[in-house]
Amino acid sequence: MRRFAGLFIWILLLHMAEAKAKPGLQIYFVDVEGGQSTLIVSPSGESLLVDTGWPGGRDADRIVAAAKAAGLQQIDYVLITHYHRDHVGGVPDLAKRFKIGTFVDHGANREDAADPREDYAAYQKVLPKYKHLTIKPGEGLPLKDITVRVLTADGEHIDSPLPGAGAANPYCAAEGKPTADITENARSLGVLVSYGNFKFIDLGDLTKDKEIEMMCPNNMIGTVDLFLVSHHGWEQSNTKALVWALHPRVAIMDNGAHKGGSASVWQVVHDSPGLQGFWQIDYAVEAGKDHNVAEEFIANPDEKNDAGKYIKVTAEPNGTFTVLNTRNAEQKTYKK
């Protein structure tokens, strides 16, 4: 009897040690100067990179630095939200610098303009060397410990509400009818990442017309804990019908010093009901002091001395998460 009791205690302690050793869900918001590159690492060490920033090597180097900080030998999935240069441009450089498993996208380029055509062609040249998936709203990716749901892709969105969602959206009434966006922004591949009770949403550069289609008259998504401000904080995105209905506890804006960070969008996010924290990758120069967060919550507050610092989030399955500014070690924990 004592032998079985001892074995039980040993197994229990082993499971407790393994649980304690798991680092939680880690999210690295890499500074790519007004583009996007967000590295998501599950507790098991599987990884998803959303977008690759600009071409030229600088952003690929910053992504690799974040991946190595996370202890990765490979990025399992690289998801391209859409084919604008600040999102897909870094693919060729990253492919030369780091091992990649599978590329994920919404399908073919839909924008008839020179830059998207050029950048899509460069992306296409890389693809034959890798596994490749095209995914649609309602589908997901098979990562351990976390759930990745596709909400939007190629101009479409989920056609039924997520569990617990579907209530009437009170913020729709005040929204006008936005002009239809015909660029790749409206085709953005947007995802919801869940880890237990923690939810993080990234909609790429999804535009107002597509936000309202998905969120009105009923909220198809529900609420989230962490919101990556869409489209770098530009005015073409971030309606109250989206931001306020999502009711995020914390928002992170991946703006550049002179890209994104519109004062009006900053105000919408800042005033979102229940918002507990707001962090930025860069100080938005044109928005002015009144429409930037306090310096301690900005990873790169001085454009002349921009060291490419990133913001890191570590989340637990109970919904508690910590945001860290790697420039100054400022951090804050938000409990569910």
Image (spheres, rainbow, N blue to C red):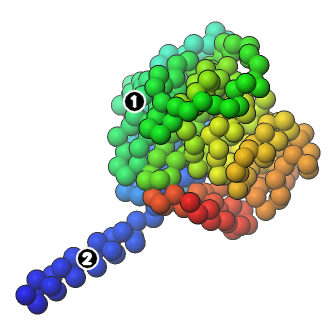
Check if mark 2's residue and mark 1's residue have beta carbons within 8 Å.
no
Give the residue displayed 51% in from the left and 36% down from the top: 165
| In the depicted structure, whether residue 182 falls above or below residue 98 | above
| In the depicted structure, whether residue 55 falls above or below residue 39 | above
Q: Amino acid at mark 2?
A: Leu
Q: CA distance from mark 2 to mark 1?
A: 36 Å
Q: Residue 139, which numbered label?
A: 1
Q: Amino acid at mark 1?
A: Glu
Name the residue beneath numbered marker 2. 12
Name the element at disc 1.
Answer: loop
In the shown orientation, is residue 33 left or right of residue 246? Answer: right
Give the residue displayed 58% in from the left and 57% down from the top: 313
* Residue 12 in picture, x, y percent from top left: 25, 76
Give the residue displayed 77% in from the left and 26% down from the top: 174
Q: Quadrant of residue 141?
A: top left
Give the mark nearest the N terminus, 2 or 1.
2
Task: Mark 1: give few (<14), some (14-19) or many (20+) Cα within 10 Å.
Answer: few
Task: Mark 2: give few (<14), some (14-19) or many (20+) Cα within 10 Å.
Answer: few
Give the camera-side residue of 36 and 120: 36
* Residue 38 in picture, x, y percent from top left: 57, 44
- Classify the position of the N terminus by image quarter: bottom left
Q: Quadrant of residue 286?
A: top right
In the shown orientation, is residue 103 left or right of residue 61? Answer: left
* Residue 231 in picture, x, y percent from top left: 69, 33
